[in-house]
Image: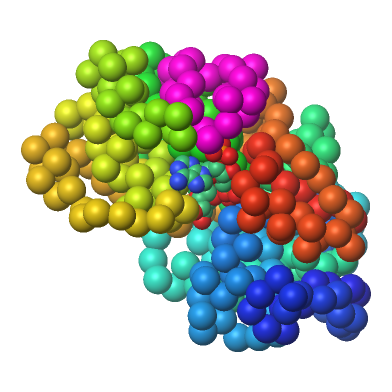
Amino acid sequence: MRAFRLYGFGLDGLAIGDLATPDPGPGQVLVETRAVSLNYRDLLMVKGLYNKHQPLPMTPASDGAGEVVAVGKDVSGLKKGDRVIGAFMQGWLDGPYTRDKSRTSLGGELPGTLATHFVLEAAGAIKIPDYLSYEEAAALPCAAVTAWNALFCESKLNSGQTLLVQGTGGASVCALQLAHAAGANVVVTSSSDDKLLRTEQLGAWKAINYRSTPHWGAAARELTGGGVDLVLEVGGVGTLRQSLDAVKYGGHIVLIGNLAVATGELPANLIIHKGVHIRGLYVGSIRMLKDVVAYMSSHSIRPVVGASFEFEQTIDALKLMESGGHFGKIVIRF
Ligand SMILES: NC(=O)c1ccc[n+]([C@@H]2O[C@H](COP(=O)([O-])OP(=O)(O)OC[C@H]3O[C@@H](n4cnc5c(N)ncnc54)[C@H](OP(=O)(O)O)[C@@H]3O)[C@@H](O)[C@H]2O)c1
């Protein structure tokens, strides 16, 4: 099989290599890849900023969609020809998150999907609904599960409540789609007015350009008459102050990313005074992937694929992600 292999950290450390196609072990299936979506984590991984101890060479990327071409012993419920996606964490079936489960991620501890073939645990392979293409389905395992976990798994976002999503990348756009379908009002921030216009077509309620409105937290609080119920925090410490200004008293901030340059101190007094619930999360379980796929199917939600590239152009795709020029998901076609 052919795979993108990371031989040394940095985009110039990535090259296509030939590897033996693996046989699926007991309880596993072999998938022929049709599409892979990139997540910001993949870029960080390639650049050595995700885990500087990551053993190399390795095959990056967690999110793959394809066709089952071989089935190991003791597999039931899957057969050759099935269209599947793989769960980000192959060992987190359900229940509470643990250290052991965190160490079962594709494109991390396990070989990634940027290859013509990849192996999945049968329990971690989910059938793709008929209405989704391979490219759309490949967009789901990380971004959709993260958004689902953030919105509905602990602090449940209800109809009529308000969500603020930062930026228009894969995780944020998916959160916008899920929240809109649930009847929530979504405030979107972005560095680009053009991208904000696109979010209106997806049901965004209010839009704020975080470049031209650097104090967007206060702007969001005013728009919502007292603050949003939930913030999806992708900037991290560098944007937390604004998120704390945006959120209502007793509201929730779900911290998933660290994109912004960290400046200033952690505003502990504000967190305490406003009684804000701050929760970190790392993607989610196989159960959550099944749940979000069922939810998206029932609402006919199609993931937003903003750009797609051929397998051989993967480095260009990662450069696009690095530039932030994309909207929604970036997908690699096979
Ligand atoms: N914890 C988890 O399980 C989990 C899961 C998924 C993602 N993440 C994290 O979430 C973040 C986004 O991931 P992704 O895959 O969705 O990335 P992505 O598709 O590359 O999205 C990046 C977008 O974020 C926006 N952005 C960048 N800097 C920003 C800032 N300072 N303030 C507000 N928005 C900013 C930009 O949107 P505009 O161009 O519109 O400004 C940019 O296009 C990353 O940090 C990633 O590691 C974490």
Could you tell me which quadrant the C terminus lies in? bottom right
Considering only vertical position in the picture, is 43 above or below 57? Answer: above
Considering only vertical position in the picture, is 321 above or below 69? Answer: above
Q: From the top left corner, tell me how far across and down residue 82 is, in percent.
A: 84, 50
Front residue (pair 22, 244): 244
Q: Quadrant of residue 173?
A: top right
Front residue (pair 76, 281): 281
Q: From the top left corner, tell me how far across and down residue 208 is, in percent.
A: 45, 24
Front residue (pair 68, 168): 168
Q: Quadrant of residue 322?
A: bottom right
Q: Which residues are magenta?
A: 181-209
Is residue 203 part of the magenta span, yes or no?
yes
Can residue 100 be seen in the rendering of this structure? yes
Can residue 177 be seen in the rendering of this structure? no
Q: Residue at x 41, y 39 (%)?
A: 232
Could you tell me which quadrant the N terminus lies in? bottom right
74 left or right, relative to 170: right
Considering only vertical position in the picture, is 86 above or below 210? Answer: below
Q: Residue at x 63, y 63 (%)?
A: 42
Q: From the top left corner, tell me how far across and down residue 149 is, in percent.
A: 45, 43
Q: Residue at x 36, y 29 (%)?
A: 216
